[in-house]
Image (cartoon, rainbow, N blue to C red):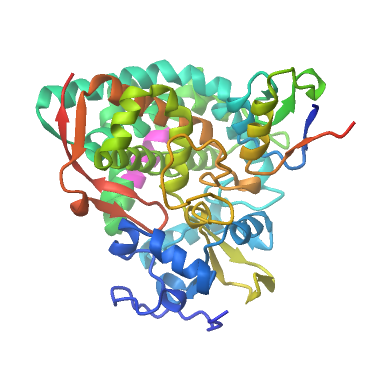
């Protein structure tokens, strides 16, 4: 392996990358527009790359390496799953909160044995049966959004006006937020996940608003329990103890940060794909029975999520020795393009039947909301194709992609031919 | 043809259940078990193979009798 530099966190963000094997940048706009060629190059000559950017990290690109790493629990710890380190102000706040109350967002940030009881707490909210009960609401929502898009005219932003509008409202519905406040809630969530990405003050402002709102909801449910997720969390016990309000709020926050920009990225990427590939778009109009395999294939090809792990004890993967404290990026998106596992990996095949992708991770940290994400994609795409006669991305090369932890289109003007 | 799901490997992805609900059930945590003792009805062999080939945890296998 070409690199064994000690981790050095000196910031060099913004400089051009000369060699992706020793200096990769997960925030590079070109990389986030089309990472496939870079992963292909790395997989062939340096399958576990290293960079000192963004706090320093290792980045695997082969399926087997990513899989082995994801399963190496707890040698690779999930206590700090962020790919991009928090700003100094944010870091201070997070450290203070963890000191006071314990793990911030269990189970995503927990190792065994804490992980399992928390995961079992949320899994029933997202079982296939539970998710089907959210489908009618999601369908109504998607139709309302399409009504607005069609009424407005011939141009819409597939990311802002559609993809980003669905997941926050579905999560709000599951948690139990009043429908009359769903628009407001969606703005708060977008404040954290969008504007807040570049501006820690905005992020913090909306974090506080949402935290206070959840606290009010808990107080209200204490008087009048309901059948929503927040009431269920209030009744739940771990090792015979009720959860503290802080923990309940932490779990609700996890549902927000884990279930929203991830899913809107998948929906947005799917619209990008069909809005730029005319033959695939026409095929979906003609053969809607392809939706199940097409959705899995888009999840594989445009996998939005990378997670980070911290090395707890000296360990080697693929001949690379890693030291305690090293950060490792679980590069599920690159693993899903490995030619050892996928035939023609850099090609989208809408009818690909063998598709053992890891878009939702593998091992104990498998995404708890994967059934929900799939249902939302299914409803979002079917409703879009049912209601909109034709569409295309106006300038594909001008689409703005987010990167780092979650990759997906964020600004994507499209031409729309209404129903 | 008889299938089994390794409960130590299954993490509840539900890929098998969505491909072949005739062959698998899942519980409230998403963990899969086989229906009908894993026995695959005639004509369902292709679906069984697809379920095996799509499990991200490599948790499904064919039991040798």
Residue A291 place in picture, x, y as percent: 43, 28
Q: Nearer the viewer, residue A51 or B15?
A: B15
Look at the image and give the residue range highlighted in magenta: A206-215
Residue at 16 percent across and 22 percent down: it is A418
Q: Quadrant of the C terminus of chain A?
A: top left
Q: Main secondary structure of the magenta part?
A: helix
**Whether residue A102 is visible:** no
Residue at 29 percent across and 53 percent down: it is A401
Examine the rendered structure and indicate whether residue A400 appears above or below residue A169.
below
Is B17 on the left or on the right of A163, as rendered? right
Residue B51 place in picture, x, y as percent: 65, 32
Is A379 on the left or on the right of A50, as rendered? left
Examine the rendered structure and indicate whether residue A206 appears above or below residue A177.
below
Farthest-out residue, right: B65
Q: Quadrant of the N terminus of chain A?
A: bottom right
Is A29 on the left or on the right of A355, as rendered? left
Q: Nearer the viewer, residue A172 or A309?
A: A309
Residue A309 place in picture, x, y as percent: 57, 61
Quadrant in which residue B28 is drawn: top right
A212 in magenta: yes
Residue at 47 percent across and 34 percent down: it is A351
Q: Nearer the viewer, residue A91 or A358?
A: A358
Residue A38 place in picture, x, y as percent: 40, 66
**Whether residue A55 is visible:** yes
Residue at 52 percent across and 73 percent down: it is A46
Is B24 on the left or on the right of A393, as rendered? right
């Amino acid at each position: 392996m070409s690199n064994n530099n000690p981790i050095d966190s000196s910031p060099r963000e913004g400089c051009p990358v000369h060699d992706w094997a020793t200096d990769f940048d997960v925030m590079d706009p070109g990389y986030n527009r089309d990472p496939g060629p870079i992963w292909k190059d790395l997989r062939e000559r340096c399958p576990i790359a290293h960079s000192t950017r963004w706090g320093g990290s290792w980045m695997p690109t082969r399926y087997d390496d990513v899989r082995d790493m994801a399963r190496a629990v707890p040698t690779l710890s999930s206590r700090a799953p962020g790919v991009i380190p928090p700003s100094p102000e944010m870091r201070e706040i997070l450290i203070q909160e963890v000191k006071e109350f314990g793990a911030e967002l269990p189970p995503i940030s927990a190792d065994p044995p804490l992980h399992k009881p928390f995961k079992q707490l949320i899994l029933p909210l997202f079982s296939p049966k539970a998710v089907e009960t959210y489908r009618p609401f999601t369908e109504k929502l998607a139709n309302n959004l399409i009504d607005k898009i069609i009424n407005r005219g011939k141009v819409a932003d597939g990311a802002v006006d559609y993809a980003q509008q669905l997941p926050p409202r579905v999560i709000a519905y599951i948690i139990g937020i009043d429908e009359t406040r769903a628009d407001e809630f969606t703005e708060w969530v977008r404040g954290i996940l969008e504007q807040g990405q570049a501006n820690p003050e905005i992020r913090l402002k909306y974090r506080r608003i949402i935290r206070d709102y959840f606290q009010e909801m808990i107080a209200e449910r204490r008087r009048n329990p309901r059948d929503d997720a927040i009431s269920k969390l209030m009744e739940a016990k771990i090792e015979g103890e009720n959860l503290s309000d802080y923990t309940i709020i932490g779990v609700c926050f996890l549902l927000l940060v884990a279930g929203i920009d991830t899913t809107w990225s998948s929906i947005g990427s799917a619209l990008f794909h069909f809005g730029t590939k005319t033959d695939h778009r026409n095929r979906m109009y003609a053969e809607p029975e392809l939706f199940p395999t097409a959705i899995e294939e888009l999840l594989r090809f445009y996998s939005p999520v990378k997670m980070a792990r911290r090395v707890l004890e000296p360990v080697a993967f693929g001949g690379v020795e890693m030291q305690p404290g090293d950060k490792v990026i679980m590069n599920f998106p690159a693993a899903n393009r490995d030619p050892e596992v996928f035939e023609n990996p850099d090609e989208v095949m809408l009818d690909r039947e063998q598709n053992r992708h890891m878009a939702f991770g593998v091992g104990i940290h498998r995404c708890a909301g994967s059934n929900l994400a799939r249902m939302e994609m299914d409803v979002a795409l079917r409703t879009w194709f049912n209601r909109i006669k034709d569409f295309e991305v106006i300038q594909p090369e001008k689409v703005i992609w987010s990167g780092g932890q979650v990759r997906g289109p964020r600004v994507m003007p499209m031409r729309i031919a209404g129903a | 043809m008889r299938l089994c799901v390794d409960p130590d490997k299954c993490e509840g992805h539900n890929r098998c259940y969505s491909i072949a609900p005739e062959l698998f059930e899942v519980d409230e945590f998403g963990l899969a078990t086989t229906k009908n003792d894993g026995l695959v009805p005639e004509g369902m062999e292709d679906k069984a193979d697809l379920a095996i080939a799509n499990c991200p945890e490599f948790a499904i296998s064919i039991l040798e009798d």
